[in-house]
Amino acid sequence: MGALQATVICFILLQTCSITAQDGEWKSATATYTKQRDDSIITEGACGYGDLHKTSYGKYSAGLSSMLFNRGSTCGGCFEVRCVDHILWCLQGSPSVILTATDFCPPNYGLPSDYGGWCNFPSRHFEMSEAAFSEIAERKADIVPVQYRRTKCKKVGGIRFTLNGSVYFYQVLITNVGLDGEVVAVKVKGSKTGWIPMGRNWGQNWQCNVNLAGQPLSFEVTTTSGRTVTSYNVAPANWRFGQTFGGKQF
């Protein structure tokens, strides 16, 4: 099946599909960096990951323009990025870095796309940490041409589930997802319930309006390629909001 056919089918079925997740072809984009403490992106972004060092993303994180962010469904996806076609700014040999999508780079239509409005639609743009940017280009560059391709995410340890909410509003933040990286469906199960589908609240925060207090919790996580992993009894019966638990990995 060709990419065009697959795109049409995805549109008709109104499903979340990620053709590029399986596509290793290099595509053209641009990249800049944002300067923060320790040369890393550490602040909470549009994917809801919070402190990116605590969630293991740290300096190898990136904010994506609208074309790449896809309304948050790309959160957690991994990209290989290299600087190309600029003899002054690109490092010799065009080394690459692997980045995880953790934030949205908003458009600025008051500025042209080639000067300040890097993330204006339909531009494909990566806003990187200074440390990651310096591994592919000179720090004194403002914007550089890059090539990118989707790649599998390599994560250490299992998928992490951070519990938040209140008695009748239950939310879980899902991080450290391997392979596809992007989560498209989540179910939760208590010891007194069946499997309950959760809805995306924002980024990779998923919710349901069920009282799960006092029950050990299991999770079923599905990624863009349709693969599912089930982690049984991840959280014990005495779990509390704010705690993080580790499950299985893809």
Image (tube, grey):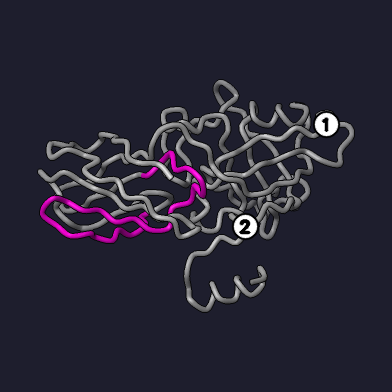
Residue 220: x %, y % from top left = 32, 53
Q: Quadrant of residue 94?
A: top right
Q: Give the x, y percent position of residue 98.
A: 62, 37
Secondary structure under the numbered disc 2 in the rendered image: helix
Q: Is residue 68 left or right of residue 176?
A: right
Which of the image's four quarters has the N terminus?
bottom right
Q: What residue do we see at 76% from left, 51% from top?
A: 28
What label does residue 93 carry, if any?
1
Question: What is the magenta range?
Answer: 174-201
Q: Is residue 153 magenta?
A: no
Three-letter code, disc 1: Gly
Using a 10 Å C-alpha cutoff, classify the residue at mark 1 as few (fewer than 14 neighbours), some (14 to 19) or many (20 or more). Answer: few
**Residue lying at 62% horizontally and 28% vertically, measured from the top left:** 35
In the displayed orientation, state which residue is furthest to the top: 38
Compared with residue 245, is residue 108 higher up or lower down, i.e. above or below? Answer: below
User: Which residue has dot 2 on it?
Assistant: 20
